[in-house]
Amino acid sequence: MNDPSTSTRQVLSLGERSLEAGTSSFEAGVDTLQSLDPLVLSLLILAIVAVLLGGWWLVRWFRRPAGVRLQRLLSSYDEVAVLMHPNPDPDAMACAMGVAAIADSVDTETTLQYSGEIRHQENRAFRTVLELDLENVESSSELAADAVVLVDHNTARGFTGAQTIEPVAVVDHHPGNGTGTKFTDVRTEYGAASTIFVEYVGEIGATKVTDDEDTGSGLTLSPELATGLLYGIQADTNHLTNGCSNAEFDAAAYLFDAIDEDLLERIANPQVSDDVLQIKATAITEKRVEGSFAICDVGLISNVDAIPQAADELMHLEGVTAVVVYGESDGTIHLSGRSRDDRVHMGETLRHAVSDIPMANAGGHARMGGGQLSVDHMRGIGPSDGIDRTEFEERLFSALSGER
């Protein structure tokens, strides 16, 4: 049987040897530092301090809420260009309003810009009722500032030189690989990008105001901004019935007491043009239905914004769970799809349907998607054999049923 006192002595001896080794190593380290040139030693100390300060700063930066970080980023510029996607919808315009409000709170000027056209009656009403000052651009040289913020899309497109744009910030809810050089917030689980800006407003601590109140300094949530953000959420979620996350309901509740109901009603109920009604009628009467899927070619059109409206109309048909409507304008076929079928991811469905047609692009979310393809390329220009409209519809039905 071992003597306890012997074991104790062994442990103490081991501890003494470890302490001696540690002391020796420390003394060796001190000797090494003392032997260094004073200039080298000073630079080494400065480098260590810089690393510690940099790590502390990064921890503090990323612990700040995203809205606060965006506000601080915007404060570092005198002016930024806020770029919406081509043919902007209420969600994109509301996000641009959000950036402008945050920038204004730190005295940064903004110019809200877009490519394409604003033709959908709902989009035109949104712009007119909220009195938005928006500028159209056709090339990158027309952007108002070198610092560009992308909202509701994450890769600039739709104008000459778009591929050269490196945005400083990106805020979006669509799938994609685009990022900002200094700030990126892409939440594909959200139903609308406007929801993200509602959270920013709350994180920054905005003051809700009415028209007759003195806003003073800091970020304010005006009735116009609140109404715009709420309608942006409603537009992208079909009035909170499609593609919502809990965040959309939380955002709507936060905005509720700040909106202007008259402005909201005027945006939501614009007059409809004759050509839109005609295209809706064509979609209803000329649709082709197989099982629970409906497809319609509405032919030559002058208003491409009528296509998604026609798709929305077809979704009201009893027994139909997914629809695709397409039409031709200026040599391009425009597609719009809607789905309430758990088996059909509409964005992926459209992407698969056009995957081997040169120069075609399509995509979107589970419940809605869109795309464009050149008529000439569909007919066979390029490395493909070409297909006609009937074959194209067969592809769409196959993609809807998961066979493609």
Image (spheres, helix red, strand yellow):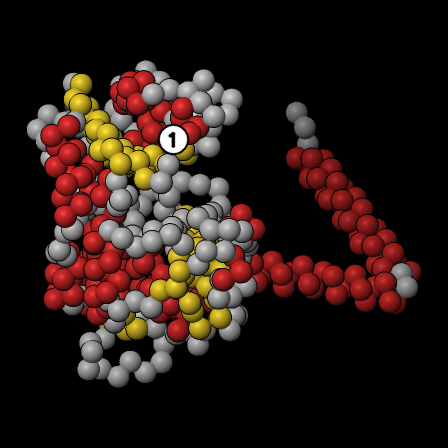
Q: Please state if 343 lies on the left or on the right of 173 as rendered.
A: left
Residue 8: image quadrant is top right
- Other residues around mark 1 within 10 Å, as few (<14) / some (14–19) / many (≥20): many
Residue 67 visible:
no
Residue furthest to the top: 403
Residue 304: image quadrant is top left
101 is higher (above) or lower (below) than 196:
below
Residue 108 visible:
yes
> Which of 378/1 is in front?
378
> Which of 261/317 is in front?
317
Which amino acid does the dot numbered 1 rest on? Val
Q: Please state if 55 lies on the left or on the right of 42 as rendered.
A: left
Name which residue lies at 83% across and 64% down: 41
Residue furthest to the left: 318
Name which residue lies at 33% across and 27% down: 349
Residue picked out by circle 1: 375
> Which of 182/402 is in front?
402
Residue 189: image quadrant is top left
261 is higher (above) or lower (below) than 194:
below
312 is higher (above) or lower (below) than 149:
above
Looking at the rendering, in which quadrant would you find the N terminus?
top right
Instruction: Estimate the x, y position of residue 116 in percent, counting from the top left.
Output: 37, 52
Instruction: Estimate the x, y position of residue 106 in percent, counting from the top left.
Output: 43, 74
Name which residue lies at 40% across and 26% down: 378
Q: Please state if 217 lies on the left or on the right of 55 as rendered.
A: left
Q: Please state if 304 lies on the left or on the right of 79 as rendered.
A: left
